[in-house]
Image: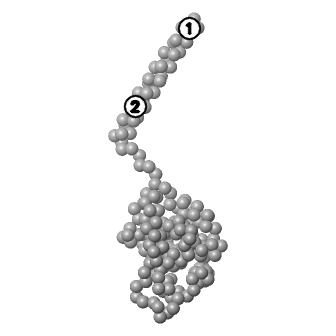
């Protein structure tokens, strides 16, 4: 799945792992993914992420996370930090978000959109705790990831349809002329 991630989205995932380590957590949860998004937003050129996620100081965001999930135990950390089942679902949802937007790659904004699809996640509790208007973020995300537009019919089909419309228009004009003649005869 990660091969479909943009550089920005990959960076978010790497930053979320760093955030989990920094908080001494032995897992990557939605709260870490959200911290990765905030972190990436600070220096990222991903304009969609900058436009959708409010600027929050990292210290403030981390503090809010630790209010919900306390710091972990330094002795419990090992090399690999696994994703929680909830984050796996968010990553899968990000693919669906990108696909619905008609895009082949998954961007950071699709990760944010996927987080917003899980109201029971820790990330959503963090957003609420930060006083962020979730509806406003959701609206910004929808504007940044428009739904795929239907593809126009192939040119050959378009030409056939245009010809049919032209013929129907001619038939309507002929019927109008006949109707006008019939009305004139009835008046005379």
- Mark 1 or mark 2: which comes first in sequence? 2
In the shown orientation, is residue 153 left or right of residue 119?
Answer: left
* Residue sticking out furthest to the bottom: 75
How far is disc 1 from disc 2 in space, using C-alphas? Answer: 33 Å
At x 38% / y 70%, what residue is drawn? 1
Q: Is 30 above or below relative to 163?
A: below
Q: Residue at x 59, y 66 (%)?
A: 137
Q: Is residue 117 above or below residue 13?
A: above
The structure residue drawn at horizontal position 44% and vertical position 24%, both measured from the top left corner, is 170
Residue toward you, 131 or 54: 131
Task: Identify the residue under disc 2.
Answer: 164
SS at circle 2: helix
Residue pushed farthest top?
188
Residue at horizontal 50 percent and vertical 88 percent from the top: 24
Instruction: Quadrant for residue 158, please give it.
Output: top left
The image shows residue 57 at horizontal and vertical percentages of 60, 79
Q: Using the rendered image of the protein, determine whether residue 48 is visible from the camera's viewpoint.
A: no
Where is residue 79 drawn, in percent x and y?
A: 40, 88
Give the class, few, some or many, for how many residues have Cα within 10 Å of label 2's Cα (few <14, many ≥20): few
Q: Secondary structure at mark 1?
A: helix
Q: Is residue 169 above or below residue 107?
A: above
Label annotation for residue 186: 1
Q: Is residue 115 left or right of residue 151?
A: right
């Amino acid at each position: 799945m990660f091969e479909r991630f943009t550089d920005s989205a990959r960076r978010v995932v790497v930053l979320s792992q760093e955030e989990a380590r920094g908080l001494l957590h032995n897992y990557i949860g939605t709260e870490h993914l959200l911290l990765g998004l905030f972190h990436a937003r600070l220096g990222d050129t991903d304009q969609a992420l900058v436009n959708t996620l409010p600027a929050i100081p990292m210290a403030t965001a981390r503090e809010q996370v630790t209010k919900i999930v306390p710091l972990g135990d330094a002795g419990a950390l090992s090399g690999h930090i696994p994703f929680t089942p909830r984050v796996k679902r968010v990553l899968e949802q990000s693919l669906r978000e990108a696909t619905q937007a008609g895009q082949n790659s998954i961007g950071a904004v699709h990760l944010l959109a996927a987080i917003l699809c899980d109201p029971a996640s820790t990330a959503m509790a963090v957003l609420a705790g930060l006083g962020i208007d979730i509806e406003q973020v959701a609206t910004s995300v929808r504007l940044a990831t428009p739904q795929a537009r239907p593809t126009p019919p192939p040119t050959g089909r378009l030409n056939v349809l245009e010809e049919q419309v032209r013929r129907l228009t001619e038939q309507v004009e002929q019927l109008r002329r006949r109707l006008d003649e019939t009305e004139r005869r009835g008046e005379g």
